[in-house]
Image (cartoon, rainbow, N blue to C red):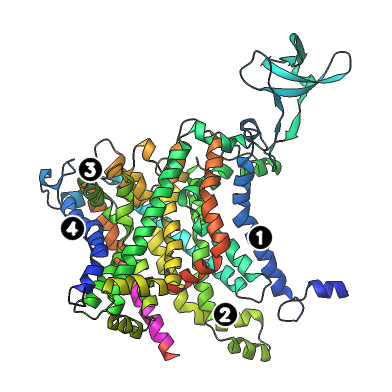
Amino acid sequence: MKTSASTPWFFLAPNMIVILLFTFVPIAINFYYAFTGGVNLYPNQRPGVGVDNFSTLLECGSYFDPSTCRKDVFWQSIWNTGKYAIFQVSLMVLFALITAIVLNRKIIGRGFWRGVFFYPVLLSPVVVALIWKWILQRDGLLNAAMVGVGSDPVLWLAEPGWAFFWVTFVSVWAHMGFYTLILLAGLQAIPADLYEAAQLDKASPWRSLTKITLPLLMPNLLVVVVLAMIKAVQVFDEVFVLTGGGPGTATTFVVQFIYQTGFVEPVRLYGIAAAGSLLLALALVALTLLQLKLSNAEKEGERAK
Amino acid sequence: MKALNFLTRTRSGRSMDWTDWLSYTYLLMGLFLMFGPVLWLVMSSFKTESALNEFPPSFLPYGQKSVAVPGEEKMKPVYRVKMPDGTTKELAELRRIGLTATLIDPARPDDLIRVNIKDREPVREFKLATENYTDLGGQVKFGTYLWNSVFITVIATILTLLFNSMAAFALSKYKFSGRSAVFLLILGTLMVPPAIVLVPNFLVISELGLLNSLWGVIWPAIATPTGVFLLRQYMLTIPDELLEAARMDNASEWQIYWRIVLPLAAPALAVLAIFSVMWRWNDFLWPLIVLSKNEKFTLQLALNAFQGDLVTQWNYLLAMTVITLLPITIVFAFLQKYITQGIASAGVK
């Protein structure tokens, strides 16, 4: 085999075929599904319905009240996802930031501590959900503690408010370490002489945090927030195993709606599922563009430094 | 005072101030919150079924002692009984009706002893219920699930390394028109979340006849943009002179890739291998859709199926959960440095 124009393509071929088959072709089919109806999986047996799937999903008396919508579960899942994204991302980034700042100090055994906070990131969503389900169940550890301090046991995953809280808490627990690492890398890039100068000026630790650390970390923080948003909008696995979307629809999120519409319901409405996933994709594209913009700004900033 | 000074000395040489105390308090709380739940899972997985049903639960796997009684199929719980004559005896309980318990001395199975339940208390002992682990194979098709998980993880990782490194080789060592377009195309798939192509991918897989086949999980997973990116960046640092020298010696392009570039890219390949193993071992949503037959379940799917059962057998479920997290934990314990560095440099998990 001599170097020729086709050599690189020979090496690229396996990877490209897989991408074509399992990413680009499906994207195209997804559009086709979104504009066709019926319950058949095979494209040639599906009648075109125009934008019916979208209007079914979007038909709503008031968008602020999911019960007035034709697909009430879809809108409920959108509201849930929005609420979840806001709470989960802000809590997670806050704790990731605190943890990163603590880990960036001169502490003994930093590698060990970093590992402690990072470990849950590697656990599978199913394992994460089961660990917490075991703690939160009726006769679980948490209720034993509740009884121990004299209050009544609570059905943590059967009350809508608590179920939502625990879903948020567990995902913060599971993913915080990843964002901690990114922020830690950002912190380590801040020149140490800035802090030394601050120390010479007898600046309080609080002042050097708000005047040096936070402003210089801001670009990283923004990227982390958007990255976490992108993940939060697609939340599914842990929640699905932990609560199954319940009680009722209290913890049903958009991806679970798509999964159930397309793969669980006795009548599988692939068109509705595909249309729903395109709407979700729209939100994700917007977030991704925001992220690209932010990380470009970050790079520009670095060059300017 | 000297001892205290020694204990509170920090790495920078000064003694601890309030920010240090705050930091270590935070870290210890973190240790409790991050590791505590996992430790609790492991402890619980060694408890017998009856110990798991106790409330409040004990931390260590204590459980009520039980003995085999002739003529009875199940093991019977042991109680310490205050006999009417004032002595106490350890007896096995056969049944309890209302306030009266019927007990028996396993050594003399013919005498039934009836006492008020107030006069008996359970005998507890430290007992590691290793049968939760050893019985797994008999209770559920554990071997099958384990094999499915291992098969998918190993094969997908090998194919990921092969395909991604070939693509990375082409993108880093050849100049050809369309190179940056291809690279962008591959990186662009990073932005396609798996949830979006769920339905059509299902069609593709069923058209290829891969539904309920482990290959249906493997194929869509192997062209990872992260892997191509990671390997390409690393291969760029391999000097082109090496390749030129090999071409002088009439090495074929495949030999250059296989004999020169691949061995030199070993560190990057290792990082990708670690990631791939973790990704595939932990995969859930896509296997959930492709594999619906019980005998094709991976460990993750089996765990999900059991926890959804009407009557959850927690003792086996917990043991299986521990086995599922074990490989990841071992990988992490030994390769923490590479994993965290890889994440910090590529920004992906």
Q: Which mark is residue A210?
A: 2
Q: Do callouts 2 and 1 mark residues in contact (Cβ within 8 Å)?
A: no
Q: Are marks 1 and 4 on the same chain?
A: no
| Residue at numbered disc 3 | A269
Which residue is at a point 66% across and 33% down the rendered structure image? Answer: B51
- A75 or B146: nearer the eye? B146
Which SS class for mark 4?
A: helix
Magenta stretch, residue numbers: A291-302
Q: Earlier in the sequence, mark 3 or mark 2?
A: 2
B142 shown above or below B262: above
Q: Residue at x 41, y 86 (%)?
A: A301
Determine whether the residue tagged by mark 2 lies in a helix, strand or loop: helix
Please state, as top left, top right, bottom left or bottom right, where the N terminus of chain B lies in the image. bottom right
Q: Chain of mark 2?
A: A
Cα distance, mark 3 to mark 2?
52 Å
The chain ID associated with circle 4 is A
Residue lying furthest front: B249
CA distance for labels 2 and 4: 49 Å
* C-alpha separation, residue under disc 3 versus residue under disc 4: 18 Å
Q: Amino acid at mark 1?
A: Met
| Residue A300 belongs to magenta span | yes
Residue A28: mark in rendering = 4
Q: Chain of mark 3?
A: A
